[in-house]
Image (tube, coloured by chain):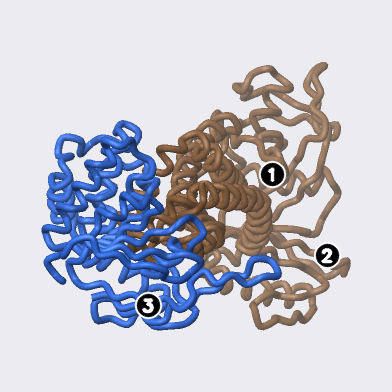
Amino acid sequence: MLVLNNIKKRYAMGEETVNALDDVSITIQDKEFVSIVGPSGSGKSTLMNIVGCLDSADEGTYILFGTDVTHLSDRQLSEVRNKKIGFIFQGFNLLSKLTALENVELPLIYQGISANERKEKAIEALKKVGLEGRVKHRPTELSGGQQQRVAIARALVTNPSLILADEPTGNLDSKSGKEIIALLHELNDNGNTIMLITHDMSLAKEAQRSIEIRDGKIVNENIYRAGDAI
Amino acid sequence: MTFFQGLKMALLSIKYNKMRSILTMLGIIIGVLSVIVLVSIGQGAGDQVTSRIKALGSNTLTVTITSNSSKSFTASELMELAGSNGIENISPSLSSSVTTKSGSQTDEDTKIIGIYPSYESIAGDTLDYGRYITDVDIEYKLTNAVVGVDVATNLFGTTDCIGETITIENKQFTIVGVLTSTGTSSTSNDDERIIIPFSTAQRIFLQSSIKSFYVSTTSEDTITQAENKISSFLDDKLGVTSTVSSDGTTTNSSYKIYNQNELIETVASTTSTLTAMLGGIAGISLLVGGIGIMNIMLVSVSERTKEIGIRKAIGAKRKDILLQFLIESIVISLSGGVIGLLLGYICTIILSNVLSMTLAISGGLVLLAIGFSVAVGVVFGLYPANTASKLRPIEALRHD
């Protein structure tokens, strides 16, 4: 379970102070598929950074699967990101010099897992996203949809509690986009908690529950279908 | 992340930036190369001079008498000292510079030295032709001479000139022996000298008292003992008292005893200062190479900001990023060091042939070069690596 309590985050923009997040409280159950929707500048990226432990809140508390991560050190946050969170970005963010397999192995390297075990787990993750035939390919040799699937395999490989997808279909054609969404559903069915961040209302409806955010505040919440956990 | 992983990442990054990595390495290659070559030249020159001095015999003492007092001693009194107190051989000497003639040929500025037969073993002289000065030559003040090869070739055009006559100070001398060539050094040419009986030299140069003599000791260990014996002998004969300082050197205004080892030490310390200076100058280029590494690593960090952001997002700790970039700079500097070492080795082989001197790369020098290039990698890689590790993941991810 993820619990965000009264999260506030401010940025200084020249003379002015912008409230990127203003008193946001969200609870997400285990195995839930939640989307955060809002236009650009709404604060959803800031929210994602905080949920993803890439940034910390100015005020409020954040409890991630029983661990209070509000006041963790840089080093401890790295460990949380490594073990508990899998990231899927709009721009894929793969390392272009590494093969698909090496990209997927990367989070395991930082866990200090042995080479054999790493390879085994990475191949397994690539199988899950249907890319077992592209193991030795580099990102430039893959289509956008395939690159995003490598990124999903990388997010999956550590068996994280939370998968954080930031506009995962933003750079893809609609067919590839649909495939990626189908893959997210599959992961959710297999018991992964998923948070999808998007500006696209129709995409947001893919989730069980959608939270709309505007000017740093939650303005609306829709339940589209009952999930297993609710 | 393990060290091995970091190494793999570093090699990959070097592979993808081949040209840049090679150019960066070049700074270190040139630095290490020049340190190796210059230091080995310095050491080689030092070894050469020291071995020349040692060739004269490291267990030799040279004594010069500066006193003008009427008190003196005879050659036979001096010769009695041989065979005891660690003294092996002893020979008075009388040297001068003369012009020699044979027919129309002249040889100018030739060193002439009057000695006893025992000088042969003290100086380590060997003969190519004929014989050395003998006791008979001394006793009858014979005008026989032993010449160096240069004297022989200058006057007769051949080294085999036994029985020929030469004119020295208007006296006819018969050549009875030709010395083996010893090669030239910058200070003196032992191949251009004439050796004659001491008694004959005394008569030619009108010198009755002994002004200098050479002593060889049984071993290097008996030098002090021999020195003490000689100084007490001279104190007695010349009627002076000398003071012996704590380090064993005899101070006296009437005579001086020169010890070959002291000379070697002086030369050795001079050349080691020279070597250190050459090494230091070459070290500056290594330093410049290090700055090159720092420069390129900083470029690399800013180019790879996005990569650092991705790595951090998926769980790389500061330590991991720091290690990755540090290993990269060490790999560059160490490879440069090893290549520089190999090139330096080749250069010294070529140079030892060209300069005809022995240039050896010592184990210490190899360690120094390798150690120094690793140190350069660490020192100049630390700042860029630290910059990389401090990047904030969200900002790094936003970077294009």
Q: Residue at 62% of width from left, 72% of height from top?
A: A17
Which x, y percent locates residue B185? 67, 40
Q: Chain of mark 3?
A: A
Q: Colour of chain B?
A: brown
Q: Distance of mark 3 from mark 1, alpha carbons?
A: 116 Å
Q: Quadrant of residue A138?
A: top left
Can the viewer see residue B313 in this picture? yes
As displayed, is residue B107 above or below residue B317? above
The residue that label 2 is drawn on is B66
- The answer to the question of whether label 2 and label 1 lie on touching residues, with beta carbons closer than 8 A, is no
Q: Nearer the viewer, mark 3 or mark 1?
A: 3
Q: Which mark is residue A25?
A: 3
Q: Residue at 84% of width from left, 68% of height from top?
A: B67
Q: Residue at 31% of width from left, 60% of height from top?
A: A35
- The answer to the question of whether label 2 and label 3 lie on touching residues, with beta carbons closer than 8 A, is no
Which x, y percent locates residue B299? 57, 48
Q: Which mark is residue B197?
A: 1
Which x, y percent locates residue B391? 50, 62
Mark 1 residue type: Pro
Q: Is residue B173 left or right of residue B36?
A: right
Q: Which chain does blue denote in the image?
A: A
Q: Chain of mark 1?
A: B
Which quarter of the rendered picture does the C terminus of chain A lie within? bottom left
Label 1 crowd (10 A; few <14 / some 14-19 / many >=20): many
